[in-house]
Structures are given as C-alpha cells and as structure tokens.
Image: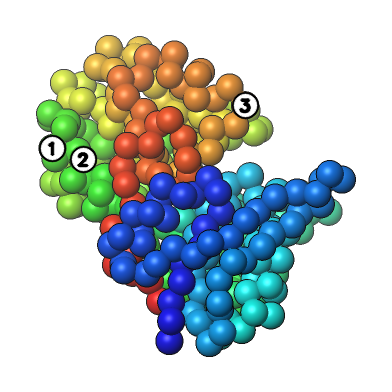
Amino acid sequence: MKKILFYFPENFSLTKTVSELSGIPVGKSEFGKFPDGESKLRIDEDLKDSEVYLLCSLDRPDSKIIPLIFFCETAKSLGAKKIHLISPYLCYMRQDKSFHPGEGVSARYFASLISRYVDSIVTIDPHLHRIKRLEEVFSIPSRVLHATALFAEYIQKNVRNPVLIGPDDESSQWVREVAEISKSPYTVLEKNRKGDWDVEVSAPKIEAYLDHTPVLIDDIVSTGRTLIQTISHLKKLKMSDPICLCVHGIFSENSFQELSQSGVQTILTTNTVLHSSNGIDVGELIAKNLF
C-alpha cells in the first residue's frame, strides 16, 4: 500500500526529518482560512488505496482540531484506506478527572472524538497520570514513545556531576527512568499547587547533592511556575544554576521569559512543540516507531 506523509505547517521541519529517516514521501497539501475565518484545505495528491500519515502536534489545540477533522474526512473521500495520526504533543490529557463540580473529563471526550477520524495514533510522553494508558480512552491502536533516552544521552554528554530533580510526583516516572539510563542520582520534590499560577515546592533530601549540577526534568512546561519555584529553592541552598529539560515546551504568555530570568543555566525542550528552546530532536524516535 502506498504511504504518504502530510503535516500541519508549523511541523514542517520535524516532518522532513521523519520523511528522510522513514522513507515515506511528503505529500502536498494546503491549509488556510476563508475571509470569514472558516478553515479550508486542499490535498494535492492521489490518495486512492493509500496509507496516510498526518504529523500534527496538538499544542494550542482548539485552532487545529477542525482542520484536523476536515483533513481526515477529505483524505478518506479521496480514497485513503488508513489515516495514522502522529501527534508529538497530545492535548487535553491533563484534564483527566473532574477537579471541580460541574467540570467534565476532557481527556476522555477528546480521545473519543479523535478515535472517530483516525485509525491509529503515535505520541510522545503524553501526560498519563490518573489515566494510565491511552487505550483506556482511545478506541484505536496507540503507541506511546518516550524521550527519556534522549534526555539521558544529553546529560551524559553535556552535564558534569548531575543530580536529576523532578519538580513534583507526576514527573517521577520520567526522572527515575532518565536517572537509570544516565546512571545519575535523582530526587523528586513535593509540590502544593494552590492555583494555575500559584505553586509552592519543597526539596526533601536535596542537601546531599549541594555540590552537584541540578537538572530539572518535567514532561510539560506551561506557566513555568513550578520550575521557577524550584529554582528559587535551589538558589537559597546556594546550588549552581540549574539546567531545565522538558519534553513539551508549551510556554503560556510570558512564562519562557520569566523562566529564563529566574537563574536558570539552560532551558532545553524537544521539538514536539516548535519553540526557540528546541534542542533535542525526536524525528528519529518517531520515524522508527510508526504504524
């Protein structure tokens, strides 16, 4: 079956790498808007009996979901037999329970919606906390990839005498695995989140590593408040400026600038979400793990 790889415009660079390493050619398509703001797209390929791959990272998702659905429906109308979604960052997974009265579980609703339009999904380090596996909410085959080995490789090559620090319990799964691969000590902080922008952290047992280079590891950086509070705590202990490694750099509002000015040595993210902090390429990881 003929395979063709398509992409959303902001994912062109990553798509090019995936295409080169997987051997799947990039197809021609156009995404745009009508004067009234409605979405339009055009697929300029023969898709009869083809297997279509669409690379679309779902940060800032609300502006992408309608074009994504339109693309899938158009591809099927043109004869595509299968549509595989490659979503390096998968949205809405953090809303995995009703946190307050009257709220819904958006993770489940979103998974149900996407499962209607694609035949499989590949993603990298989704925020799986109360939902343990994508199969719990998606009704299609799914494949979860991990950036931990890439982080470990970076640390081994670039960081002298590291101690890995997880800013909260939810980050412990990534920190522990990176520590095992890189053979580095690690600790996980305790976080008390009072609101979206109000976070307190404490660092138990960190005193044993005051002469180490702190490496903060997390899956998603959005407001950056947890990392900023952690850095402030480390500065009070007179530790060296930390390195921040995050899989997905969402960076809402002025959070990147605030984090950059907080006393951090380096902020490094993968290119799951396009950002100036991208320094770890996930293209090969994706190319080797497609359906």
**Circles 2 and 3 in contact, beta carbons < 8 Å:** no
The mark that comes first in sequence, 2 or 3, is: 2
Mark 2 lies on residue:
154
Q: Is residue 229 above or below residue 21?
A: above
Q: Amino acid at mark 3?
A: Glu
Q: CA distance from mark 2 to mark 3?
A: 28 Å
**In this rendering, would 99 be left or right of 175?**
right
Q: Residue at x 53, y 62 (%)?
A: 28
Image quarter (top left, top right, bottom left or bottom right) of the C terminus: bottom left
- Number of other residues with Cα within 10 Å of mark 1, as a class: few under 14, some 14 to 19, many 20 or more: few
Q: Residue at x 38, y 54 (%)?
A: 16
Helix, strand or loop status at disc 2: helix
**In this rendering, would 97 be left or right of 254?**
right
Q: CA distance from mark 3 to mark 1?
A: 32 Å
Q: Whole-percent x and y of residue 187?
A: 29, 39
**In this rendering, would 24 be left or right of 255?**
left
Q: Amino acid at mark 2?
A: Tyr
- Number of other residues with Cα within 10 Å of mark 2, as a class: few under 14, some 14 to 19, many 20 or more: some
Residue 265 shows up from this direction:
yes
Q: Whole-percent x and y of residue 256?
A: 50, 25
**Circles 1 and 2 in contact, beta carbons < 8 Å:** yes
Q: Whole-percent x and y of residue 22?
A: 31, 67
